[in-house]
Image: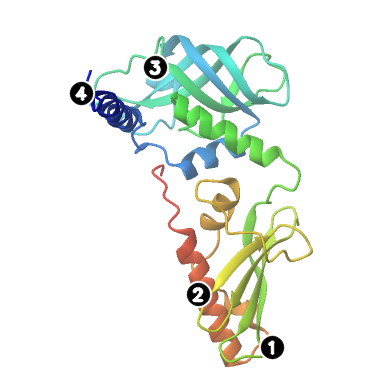
Amino acid sequence: MSRFSLPFALLALSAATAVDAQNSAPAPDTEYSFADLADLALGAPIVAHAEIDRANRLDPERAPGVAPGHLRYYVEAELSSLIRSDNALPREVRYLVDVPLDPNGDRPRLRGEEVLIMATPVRGRPGEIQLVAPSSQIRWTPEREQIIRRLLTEAAAPGAPGIVTGVGNAFSVPGALPGESETQIFLSTSDGRPVSISVLRRPNQRPRWSVSLSEIVESASPPPQRDTLLWYRLACFLPAELPRTTFESMDPNQISVARQDYQMVIGDLGQCTRYRS
């Protein structure tokens, strides 16, 4: 073997490994976005991975309100893993689900399909559950389950961000130097837990913003990474613009700066994409 053979072989192996890793990376989910999965899973008392054992189609007279192009089934499914549940469940669960016809307009084949279900228990009927939304039985993939598990773990952690319902109030104060300012934006949440956004401007620097989840503003906490619980709470529920009610007792210059700072935050968060109607 020449003295060039081993490095060349290692280089080729490294390149092949990189190509294999790139080829094995999961394709983007174009059916359910991160926000879609969060919408379904965060409010569901029961989240589970299951395999459908039996699926009996209901006659139209027993299935009122079914959307056009859909059929209603009575499903019996075996739980593969219980991702979240406040109460114990038997291994087999039963529920109704509306599913679309396949692309050829035929009945879908459900038996043996692995699904993720987001549901609530039916009181007084052990093993019977009700889906939290018409589309809360979805096809199982490892990636979807991983996202949902991570979301639910974040939501259960102490100090997790509350559900953002709007902007409470905001103020902006100038600093000692020209072009220096600080904007504080306080958000309303469904459970009263504090969430606030701070934007700092310094001369000749790009404005920096941070989020605080406590009464004490923590200017060092960085903006949330995309596809995390905090990102979802902000990007998917903040209004597109600051409401006028937040500008009480602020002069026009402060209002202008606060609006600019808020738009920068919205732009940095990026679009909250949803595919579900």
Q: Which of marks 4 and 3 is in front?
A: 4
Label 4: which secondary element: loop
Marks 3 and 1: which is nearer the front? Answer: 1
In this figure, which residue is indicated by the disc labeled 1?
249
Viewport quadrant of the N terminus: top left
In the picture, measured across the screen, residue 155 lies left or right of residue 253, that is right
Q: Identify the amino acid type marked 1.
A: Ser
Q: Position of residue 164 (x, y in %)?
A: 63, 56
Q: Which of marks 1 and 2 is in front?
A: 2
Q: Would you name the residue on which mark 2 appears?
A: 206
- The foreground one among 262 and 136 is 262
Residue drawn at x 56%, y 70% is 208
Looking at numbered disc 4 in the image, what kind of residue is underneath it?
Asn
Q: Looking at the picture, how far across and down is residue 138, in whole percent?
A: 44, 27
The residue indicated by pointer 3 is 59
**Residue 241 is at least partly visible in this image:** no
Q: Indicate the secondary structure of the residue bearing disc 2.
A: loop
Q: Which of marks 1 and 2 is nearer the N terminus?
A: 2
Q: Is residue 266 visible?
A: yes
Q: Comparing marks 1 and 4, which lies closer to the viewer? A: 1
Q: Distance between the residues labelled 3 and 1?
A: 63 Å
